[in-house]
Image (cartoon, grey):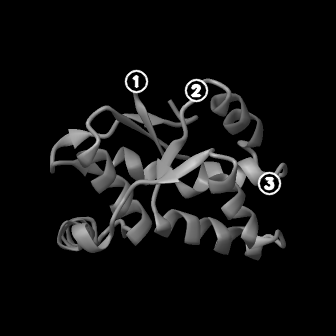
Amino acid sequence: METVIADTGPLVAYFDRREPHHEWVCSALKEWSEPMVTCDAVLAETAFVLSRKGQPPDVVFSLLTEGLVTLGFDTAKNHRELAALMRAYRNVPMSVADASLVRLSELRRDSVVFTLDRDFLVYRRHGRQRIPLLEPFV
């Protein structure tokens, strides 16, 4: 089974009904039964964005409590690879969260990144491989 790696955009859209892709995200979530995998940086970004939208940022922890997402990435063990990715995509620029998801997709070959971020159309895993995406822009 494919591992679904969750990015910030879909998590924000899940909580915020005013987001343009809210319905698409909720529909996509019904398609799989396994928890999505993400990283601490994505949870931090999601909480920050929700707080800027006037929503309670602590709702991000309900994702863990309800088993919708699990944390599956160790930044400390991958910091060199993250730094290399961020140098390689400095012109985009790449956030720590995006670098973590690219690296997570390298570590989980059977994965697809669930995103609303068009930058993932540019990013490559292992330098040259397109990252399989679940996104509304195709």
Q: Callout 2: few (<14), some (14-19), or many (20+) C-alpha neighbours within 10 Å?
A: few
Q: Residue at x 38, y 44 (%)?
A: 121
Residue 43 visible in rendering: yes
Q: Which residue is drawn at 79% across and 70% down?
A: 53
Name the amino acid, label 1. Met
Question: Could you say which quadrant of the image residue 82 lies in?
Answer: bottom left
Residue pointed to by mark 2: 32
Front residue (pair 22, 30): 30
Please state if 65 lies on the left or on the right of 42 as rendered: right
Q: Position of residue 111 (x, y in %)?
A: 36, 36
Residue 95 visible in rendering: no
Q: Which of marks 1 and 3 is nearer the N terminus?
A: 1
Please state if 54 lies on the left or on the right of 60 as rendered: right
Q: Residue at x 52, y 63 (%)?
A: 42
Say which element carries label 3.
loop
CA gap, disc 1 and disc 3: 29 Å
Q: Which of marks 3 and 2 is nearer the N terminus?
A: 3
Residues marked 1 and 2 touching at CB (< 8 Å): yes
**On screen, residue 51 above or below 62:** below
Residues marked 3 and 2 touching at CB (< 8 Å): no
* Number of residue marks: 3
Residues marked 1 and 3 touching at CB (< 8 Å): no
Residue pointed to by mark 3: 16
Q: Which of marks 1 and 2 is nearer the N terminus?
A: 1
CA gap, disc 3 and disc 2: 21 Å
**On screen, residue 103 above or below 128:** below
Question: Could you say which quadrant of the image residue 46 lies in?
Answer: bottom right
